[in-house]
Image (cartoon, rainbow, N blue to C red):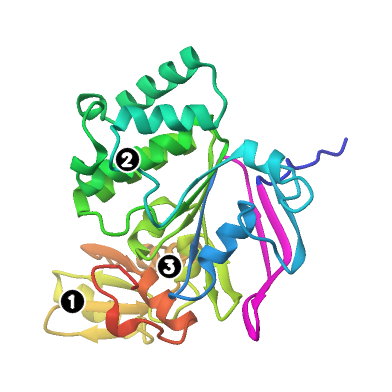
Amino acid sequence: MTTTSPSPAISAEGLRKAYGDKTVLDGIDLHIPAGSVFALLGPNGAGKTTAVKILSTLIGADAGELRVGGHDPAADPQAVRAEIGVTGQFSAVDGLITGAENMLLMADLHHLPKREGRRAAAELLERFDLSAAADRPAVTYSGGMKRRLDLAMTLVGDPRIIFLDEPTTGLDPRSRHNMWGIIRELVTGGVTVFLTTQYLEEADQLADRIAVLDDGTIAAEGSAGELKRLIPGGHVRLRFSDPVAYRSAAAALREAVPDDEALLLEIPSDGSQRELRSILDWLDSAGVEADELTVHTPDLDDVFFALTGGAGRSAAKDGAVR
């Protein structure tokens, strides 16, 4: 008996978009499973926001076969819009009205009956810890509160696919971590999240799969661990307290880089389970005991800079690519 895998929540094959002579997306392919977080990374101008706008029906593609929630954004945009929610780079919150009024406005836009709209607004305001501020003008909200309200407004229509275009830009670390918790809760509930971000730590923390977009093409795609293993420089570090054990290990592991003063050995490794098992098996068979074994792999900053030719390196701070 053959089984078929479920259709992806979002798929694109050969997605192309150009503005005049400038090709922004040059035939990219995306396949995003339902109930997962997909992160699209890339330097400014790489085409991340353009991809979001096309998939969310805001602009058309020049070429490509696209499906969002099983629907073609070009042929049936209304069906796609019924499945999705979008939180853009810039807040959709109206600062002149209250948080509750912003929510009710979204309920009206979704054509919810008044009673259902009020219920949805109240539940979401409570869920996002905004009930106490619901009757205050949104202009008085902090940056983190506005972002939470923005996402709450996105959820009024109960979308199963959410596009988050740099949702935590400008937030302080506490507000950013709070937003991460909200995103994780959404995915636990079966929501699919398409995330673009300039914070590499954010992709590392949240995404099941990550694609690096550079010069209109996907430079690499995989889990955070898979991407990190693409970049050389990973190693396993063995620390010893017994000088005899250290010298025995150094003599046998000739590829290791020794540090005689610290009694440390660094063994080049991609951090895979196979290589770790091989090292542990050797230690056991030789009767050598290391006091500590740690695995060091390149981080997403290294991956990003290697795959994008160092774009934005001078401006990258605290895990952000600006």
State yes or no: residue 17 in magenta. Answer: yes
* Mark 2: secondary structure: helix
Q: Identity of the amino acid at label 3?
A: Gly
Q: Name the residue located 23 percent from the left edge and 81 percent from the top edge.
A: 247
Which quadrant of the rendered structure holds the C terminus?
A: bottom left
Sort mark 2 into few (<14), some (14-19) or many (20+) by Cα contacts within 10 Å.
many
* Residue labelled with disc 1: 244
Specify few, some or many for label 3: CA neighbours under 10 Å numbering under 14, 14-19, or 20 or more.
Answer: some
Q: Which residue appears farthest toward the top when viewing the image?
A: 115
**Which callout, 2 or 1, points to the residue nearer the camera?**
2
Asked where in the image residue 50 lies, by quadrant, the reply is: bottom right
Which residue is at a point 25% across and 24% down the rendered structure image? 131
Magenta span:
10-35
Which comes sooner in the sequence, label 2 or label 3?
Answer: 2
Residue bearing the label numbered 2 = 148
Which residue is label 3 attached to?
271
Contact? badges 2 and 1 (CB < 8 Å): no
Q: Residue at x 33, y 83 (%)?
A: 313
Few, some or many C-alpha atoms within 10 Å of disc 1 (few <14, some 14-19, many ≥20)?
A: few
